[in-house]
Amino acid sequence: MKFEHFGTGIIKGLAVTLRHLFRKPITTQYPEQKLTTSRRARGNELVWDITKCTACGTCAKACPQGVIRIVTSAKPVENRYVVEKFEVDTGYCIFCGLCVEACPFQSLLMGYSYERAKYRRHEVVHTNEMLLPSAKRPASGYMYPKLAKALPPQTLLIERDEVKG
Amino acid sequence: MALKTESFALNIGPLHPSTHGVFRMRAVLDGEVIANMEPVFGYLHRGIEKLAEERTYTGVIPLTDRLDYLASMSNNLAYVLAVEKLAEISAPERATYLRVILAELQRIASHLIAVGAFVNDCGAFFTPFLYMFREREKILDLFEMLSGQRLLYNYMRIGGFNQDIPDEFLPALQKFVSQMPGFIDEYDRLLAENEILLARTKGVGILPQDLAVNISASGPVLRASGVKWDIRKADPYCGYDRFEFDIPTGTAGDCYDRYRVRIEEMRQSLRIIEQAMKQLPSGAVKSTVPYLVRPPAGEAYAHIEAPKGELGFYLVSDNSIAPYRCHIRAPSLINLTALRDMTVGWKVADLIVIFGSIDITMGEVDR
C-alpha cells in the first residue's frame, strides 16, 4: 500500500461534499409530495373505450404475455361483434404497451396513474366495467400525441439542479 | 512446532449486497488470500432465449429490456439491428441519429451506476453512489419522457421507433449535455485523487492484455488492459463513423484503469450526443414495416458496443413470425470469465473490489 498525495486528495473530496451541503435538495418526500409522471406514462391498468371496440382481438394477439382475454357473443349486432368479456390479468402484465400500439380502432389506452397495490390476489384481474375510463382512472398519452398535449408537463429533475463549478 | 493449517471454502452470495444481483462466488481461502475462486451463476435464469422462440419479432423487444436492466435501450438497439439485418429493413435517418443519442445516454447512465457501485464496494459508503444516481435520474427522466417508463423502455421498434420524440425532449437534452461535464469534473475532484481509492485499486486485479484478448473480453474491461477495440470504430453501426470521438484506453489493466476508462467514456459519449443533436434531421422515425415481420429464412448476427461490452444477437429465421433461434452474446457473462484469473492471489477484500470493477448485471449473465 502506497499513498501518493498525502491527504490532499481527501481534502479535495471533502470540499466537494461540503459544497454539496449548501445545495438545494432535489429529493421529493414521496407519499406527501408527488412528481408528475411522463405524459406518455405506461402506468396502471389499461383504459378501454367500449364504444370504439370492435372485439377484433388484435390486442390479445399482440400481447406477448397472453394477458388479454376477449369473449364475444355469437350473434353480431349492427354488423359488429358484442364484447361479453374483456379481461386483463394485470398480475401478468409487463406494461410493454404493445396492445395499445396494435389497436386499430384507438379503443385501448395505457393508464396514467401508478399506485397499483391491491389487498387481494383476485383484484388484479380486471374485467369489463373496471377498465372503462373514469376520473379515477385517467388515460395517458402513450401513442396518442393529442391526448399527451392535454396532460400536465412532466417534472424534470434537470430543471431543479444546477452545477456549481 | 508447525501449526496444522487447511484451506477454507467461503461462499460469497448468492444474496450478498456486493454481488450486484444473485451471484455466488465459492472462494477457497488460504488464510486471507484467495487460493481458488469458482463463480457459480444461474440463479436468475429465466430462459429468455427460449421464450423468444414463441413470441413474435416485435414481442421479443420487451424481453430484451430485461437482459441488462441498467441499459435497456442498448439491448433494444442490438436486437432491433439484428432483426433489421435479417429482414433487410433500414431505419430512417432521423431514427438512426436518435438511436445514437439514446445509446450514448444509456452508456452514461450505465457507467454512472458501474462507477458508483464500484466505489461503493471500495468502501466509499454511498456518497459518490448517490451523487451519480442524481445524474442518472436526469437521464431516466429523459427516457421516461420518450417511452413512458423509467427502466424497461421498450421504445425501439423494428424499422425505427414507435413514436417520435416530444417537443420538450431536445431542450431538456441540451440542458443535460451542457450540465453533465461539470458533474463529471465533480466526480473527478471527489474520487480521482482520493488516497484510499488509489490504494485500494491501483495495481489490484490486473488483467493482462493477452489474457483479456484470449477470453474475448470486451468493453471497458478490455480497453483498460490497453487494447484499442471498440465496435463503434471497428465495425460501425448506426453511422457511428460520422461522429468524432476517441477511444479511452488504460495501460495497466488494473481496477483503477477500468474506473478511469468509464469516466472518460462518459465524456466521449457527451461529445457524440452533442454532434448527433446538431446533425439530427427531421422526418419520419419509422419506415414502413408490416405489422408482423416475417423475415426470409436465414440467419443474422448484429453486435453493438453496449455499455458493458460487445452485445450481440444471433437470430435464425425459418420464415415464420417468430425467431427460430435467438442467441444472445452477453458481455457481462464473458467478462466474468476473467474473474478467477484476476482474483487468485489477492485478499478477500480485494475480491469484492475486483468483482465490482468488472461491472456485471446478473440479468444478462443468466438470461
Image (spheres, rainbow, N blue to C red):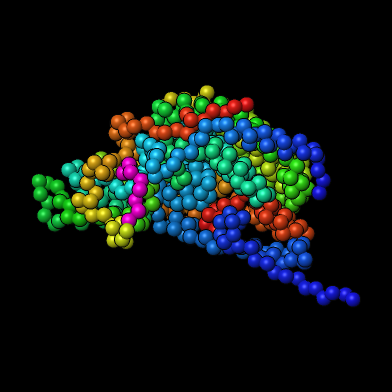
Q: Is residue B227 left or right of residue B4?
A: left
Please tell me whether residue B189 is drawn above or below residue B348 in the rendered image. Answer: above
Name, please, the residue furthest toward the left. Answer: A78
**Is A116 one of the magenta-colored residues?**
yes
Q: Which residue is drawn at 59% across and 34% down?
A: A20
Please tell me whether residue B84 is drawn above or below residue B23 in the rendered image. Answer: above
Specify the principal SS of the magenta part: loop
**Is B174 one of the magenta-colored residues?**
no
Name, please, the residue furthest toward the top. Answer: B278
Q: Is residue B133 left or right of residue B245?
A: left
**Residue A93, image x and y in percent?**
35, 53
Q: What stretch is highlighted in magenta?
A: A110-118
Residue B247's quadrant in the figure?
A: top right
Q: In this view, does B10 lie to the left or right of B63?
A: right
- The number of discs equals 0
Residue B333's quadrant in the figure?
A: bottom right
Q: Residue at x 71, y 34 (%)?
A: A12
Please tell me whether residue A29 is drawn above or below residue A121 in the rendered image. Answer: above
Please tell me whether residue B40 is drawn above or below residue B306 in the rendered image. Answer: below
Q: Which residue is drawn at 29% across and 40% down?
A: A139
Q: Residue at x 74, y 52 (%)?
A: B205
**Residue B98, image x and y in percent?**
48, 32
Residue A30's quadrant in the figure?
A: top left
Residue B228 appears in view: no
**Residue B108, image x and y in percent?**
57, 38
* Camera-nearest residue between A38 and B72: A38
Residue A10 appears in view: yes
Name, please, the residue furthest toward the right. Answer: B1
Question: Looking at the figure, which quarter contains the C terminus of chain A?
Answer: top right
**Residue B208, image x and y in percent?**
76, 50
